[in-house]
């Protein structure tokens, strides 16, 4: 359905990512970046808008301050990187250091829930190369020496940011 094309995307949750599943769910993505007006959905995708309105009480109950002063049905963690066709992703909550290369499903970029971290890639080749490097022995030793498996979110931004993907890839080519 054409109206869904702009706002409905395949979704992988952290558990799905760990299990290597293909997306079984979809998610409505209301914005391309934080602050974008969401009222355009009403005209461009009336069925999507009706669904959002029907669930507006639950959406309005979100507690994060990031939603204050934002258009209705605003999202966080959204930007150009969100819509990259290829990604390398990891679940933050599972006690596995497994990175997965993701590609579009039926021509649509896969979205990830907030229990995942990912790096946007410009091609399938790049995604496969990065995933292979991050799952390789050097990166795995690096992360294993720094991860705290008892933490609620053992894989976190600080841990992932500590490793330079550029340096890792360069070292692998040397």
Image (cartoon, helix red, strand yellow):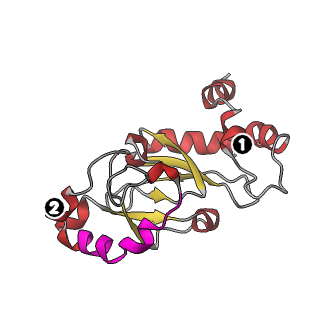
Residue at far top of view = 174
Helix or strand or loop: what does disc 2 sit on? helix
Task: Residue 95: give x, y in percent of width and height.
Answer: 76, 59
Q: Is residue 21 left or right of residue 110?
A: right
Task: Residue 14: give x, y in percent of width and height.
Answer: 60, 63
Helix or strand or loop: what does disc 1 sit on? loop
Q: Is residue 144 left or right of residue 100?
A: right
Task: Residue 105: give x, y in percent of width and height.
Answer: 38, 61
**Circle 2 Cα neighbour tier, 10 Å, few/some/many (<14 / 14–19 / ≥20):** some
Q: Nearer the viewer, residue 54 or 80?
A: 54
Q: Is residue 118 left or right of residue 46?
A: right
Q: Earlier in the sequence, mark 2 or mark 1?
A: 2
Quadrant (top left, top right, bottom left, bottom right) of the N terminus: bottom left
State how far apart marks 2 and 1 are (Cα): 45 Å
Residue 57 painted magenta: yes
Quadrant (top left, top right, bottom left, bottom right) of the C terminus: top right
Query: What residue is shown with label 2?
Result: 44
Q: Nearer the viewer, residue 33 or 116?
A: 33
Numbered circle sitting on residue 159: none
For the image, the number of numbered tags is 2
Q: Which residues are magenta?
A: 48-63
Q: Nearer the viewer, residue 21 or 1?
A: 1
**Prevailing secondary structure class for the magenta stretch in the rendered image:** helix
Query: What residue is shown with label 1?
Result: 136
Residue 33 shows in the view: yes
Task: Residue 85: give x, y in percent of width and height.
Answer: 39, 48
Residue at far bottom of view = 54
Residue at far left of view = 43
Residue at left offset 36%, top offset 50%: 70
């Amino acid at each position: 359905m054409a109206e869904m094309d702009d706002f409905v995307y395949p979704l992988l949750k952290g558990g799905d990512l760990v299990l290597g599943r293909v997306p079984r769910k979809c998610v409505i993505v209301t914005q391309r970046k934080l602050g974008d007006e969401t009222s355009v959905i009403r005209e461009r995708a009336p069925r999507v808008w009706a669904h959002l309105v029907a669930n507006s009480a639950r959406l309005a109950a979100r507690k994060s301050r990031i939603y204050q002063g934002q258009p209705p049905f605003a999202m966080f963690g959204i930007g150009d990187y969100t819509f990259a066709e290829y990604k390398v992703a990891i679940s933050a909550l599972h006690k596995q250091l497994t990175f997965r290369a993701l590609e579009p499903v039926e021509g649509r970029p896969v979205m990830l829930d907030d229990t995942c971290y990912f790096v946007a890639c410009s091609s399938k080749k790049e995604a496969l190369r990065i995933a292979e490097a991050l799952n390789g022995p050097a990166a795995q030793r690096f992360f294993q020496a720094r991860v705290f498996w008892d933490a609620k979110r053992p894989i976190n931004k600080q841990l992932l940011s500590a490793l330079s993907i550029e340096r890792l890839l360069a070292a692998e080519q040397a």
